[in-house]
Each structure stands twice: as structure tokens, then as C-alpha cells.
Image: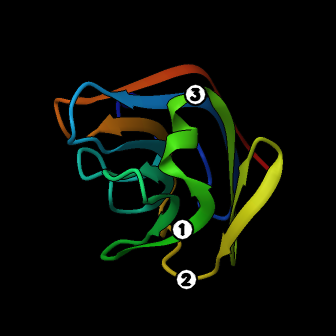
Amino acid sequence: MAFDDVKEFSNTGSVIIWVAKMTATGTNKQGGWGMCGTMPNYWLNGLKINVPTGASSYIGFYTMNNSTEAGTNTDLPVGLAMAHRTYKLEQKSSSANCYIDGEIKTTRTSGLSTTAMQPFLYQKYPDSDVHAVYCEAWNT
């Protein structure tokens, strides 16, 4: 899902809130949500939550510039992403913050988006099932 490649949200000051979850019907699951600037190459220019395959994995927070995607794991196992949670992703001029259920989980200062962004969500495998019930974004 994307927003017709209309990039209304600043890479130097914007916030997006998602209430979402990811479940899977099989063993291959991966998906996420956030903001990006380059569709359909959502892994370029943006920030996102990534829920990977593996019960022992952790929910990740990724930043992407024009050529690189890099992430930091939160302290929350992927199993917690199987229920709706509130994810707030904040892009500033020199950092990006990830809040889950109102608690800051990680901050990234490298690999920040170099262009304006739009909301997006994705599921990598057919077994993945991403559910979003709320999304709100604004420039700060």
C-alpha cells in the first residue's frame, strides 16, 4: 500500500503513527510500515518498522537513505507484533525515533532519508498478513 507516490512529509521534520499488527499463516513472515520516499523501492529513503521471520527475532526500526538501509533492533520480540500496537516514527533533521506503545525504543542518527516521504506498508511473503487500523502523519 502506498499513497500514489505523493510525498507530502518532510525528511527533516515529520511524524507518522500506525496502529498495526502482523500475523502469518506459515513460517515465512516479514512485513512492516512507516514512510518512504521512493516507490516501489520502499527500502530507499524513509523509516520503517520491520517485523522479520523468526520467533526469536526482535521488532526492528530501520532508516533508509538513497542507497542504504540499516536497522536497530528494539527490545521487543516479534511475537508482540502479533497484536495491534501503536507505533510512532519521528523523523528529525539529524535523527529518527521509534516509539512503541508510547515508550521510546530506539533512536537512529545515520542513514536518514534524503527526500520527502509518504506512508507505506508492506508484506514480503505471501504467508505474511499485515493489518493496519489507523495511520496519521504530519509535518512538524
Q: Residue 11, image x and y in percent?
A: 59, 61
The amino acid type found where label 2 is placed reads Ser
**Alpha-carbon distance for marks 3 and 2?**
30 Å
Left or right for 99, reference 113: right
Determine which residue is flagged by label 3.
83
Answer above or below: position of 32 versus 113: above
Which quarter of the rendering shows the N terminus? top left
> Which comes before the other along the chain, label 3 or label 2?
3
Q: Residue 84, image x and y in percent?
A: 61, 26
> Which comes before the other along the chain, label 2 or label 1?
1
Q: At 35% from the left edge and 72% from the top edge, which residue is drawn?
A: 66
Q: Are marks 2 and 1 in contact (CB under 8 Å)?
A: no
Secondary structure of residue under mark 1: strand
Determine which residue is flagged by label 2.
110
Labels in figure, total = 3
The amino acid type found where label 1 is placed reads Asn
Secondary structure of residue under mark 2: loop
Q: At 66% from the left edge and 65% from the top edge, which residue is drawn?
A: 12
Q: Residue 54, image x and y in percent?
A: 33, 53
Q: Which one is closest to the eye, mark 2 or mark 1?
A: 1
Left or right for 10, reference 131: right
Determine which residue is flagged by label 1.
73
**Alpha-carbon distance for marks 1 and 3?**
18 Å
The furthest residue to the top: 133
Left or right for 98, reference 29: right
Count residues near mark 1 (Cα–Cα under 10 Å), then give few for <14, some for 14-19, many for 20+: some
Count residues near mark 3 (Cα–Cα under 10 Å), then give few for <14, some for 14-19, many for 20+: few
Q: At 30% from the left edge and 76% from the top edge, which residue is drawn?
A: 67
> Which comes before the other along the chain, label 1 or label 3?
1
